[in-house]
Image (spheres, helix red, strand yellow):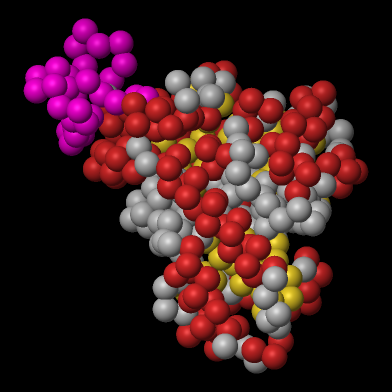
Amino acid sequence: MKKETQCVQAGTLKDNQYQGLNSPLYTSTAYGYMDKEEVCYPRYFTTPNQGAVVKKICALEGAEDGLLFSSGMAAVSTTILAHTRPGDHVILLDDLYGGTHSMATADFERLGLEYDFVATSLEAIMAAQKPNTTMVIIESPTNPLMNILDIKATADWARENKITSLMDNTFGTSINQTPLALGIDIVVHSGTKYMGGHSDVCCGFALASKKKMQPILDLARHLGGSLDSFAAYLLERSLKTLAIRVERQCQNAQALAEFLEAHPKIVKVNYPGLPNFPGHDIAKKQMKLFGAMMSFELDESIGDVDVFLRKLKVIHPAVSLGGVESSICSPKDTSHKPMTAEERARVGISDFLLRLSIGIEHIDDLKEDIEQALT
Ligand SMILES: Cc1ncc(COP(=O)(O)O)c(C=O)c1O
């Protein structure tokens, strides 16, 4: 089946009693165990509604197995903990999602893990390799500068060196890129973003082969970060429109990036779909569409980014991303606030940079909103 069809149909639970088209919602937390091979229990990650969503995502990501978590960070942290041991060395990209970044700086030492942050390039990753390197954690596109990493080349290098490759595919989405097919070992998602898509469900996924998922499942049952059936049901409903939502979001993003690039009050636009963006050629090779996240720098004549943000009427200043509604934030005041101004400048995050998550509104309304706020 094609992705659009998988979104609608994969994993749907059969309603044998009434032949309803949607998966029935099973709210029980206690299920019979006699004559059953596997016991249903929410924290065992085995309820019917959890299973329905996992089947759909496995189909979309081309994964043999997967787990649905109660947040993206539950998926990320459980996966890292399940696949590392004290004494291991982990390589992470400098511009990984802030929560993953701060898990490394706050918790790795205590867990006996060594780590190095590197720039978003395979050369930088290779240069950081040590004899005890066992894991590399990557994203592409990255937040907020949309840096692009060659996923297949990184996966090949990791496999040759017996290093577990872990990729956060939240920004790319399962619609635009499938890292497992490019050789990545484990994929994680914040489902809170595009998969939920309506800014009302917090969830996450880990996806991999059965063999790689087993230690994640074993640990997940101890850590307990499972999702309840109501949220799983809501998520399944949202996923039916994932392909169509993401396609419209990407089309809007491409048009808006071109509009911003031509605007005299915009200094720079970071969007992989722009032909002169440094990662464009690699992105074209590994992505279907170029995603719906971008960042741009306002001209300093604006005075302060808040002046611009307060004038917006359609695009909402908000943290989080990936919803049907367009949202915008200033990294210096949100995701990258814990960094010093010098550190931000070093990685290319200026005080005039804004990160934009494009929704499904009409493109003319988005352009007009930005135009009136710049005037
Ligand atoms: C790329 C990425 N990964 C992981 C996460 C963490 O997800 P959650 O907030 O659902 O725990 C986020 C959240 O913003 C994210 O943007």
**Residue 148 position within the rendered picture, expressed as x and y whole percent measured from the top left:** 73, 48
In-image side of 190 versus 274 (left or right): left
Stretch of the chain drawn in magenta? 10-39
Q: Nearer the viewer, residue 27 or 304?
A: 304
**Residue 91 position within the rendered picture, expressed as x and y whole percent measured from the top left:** 76, 44
**Residue 202 position within the rendered picture, expressed as x and y whole percent measured from the top left:** 39, 51
**32 vs 289: above or below:** above
In-image side of 96 versus 217 (left or right): right
Q: Quadrant of the C terminus?
A: bottom right
Q: Quadrant of the N terminus?
A: top left
Q: Nearer the viewer, residue 161 or 361?
A: 361
Residue 271 seen in the current view: yes
**78 vs 101: above or below:** above
Residue shown at 68% from the left, 81% from the top: 265
Q: Nearer the viewer, residue 318 or 222?
A: 318
Residue shown at 79% from the left, 56% from the top: 276
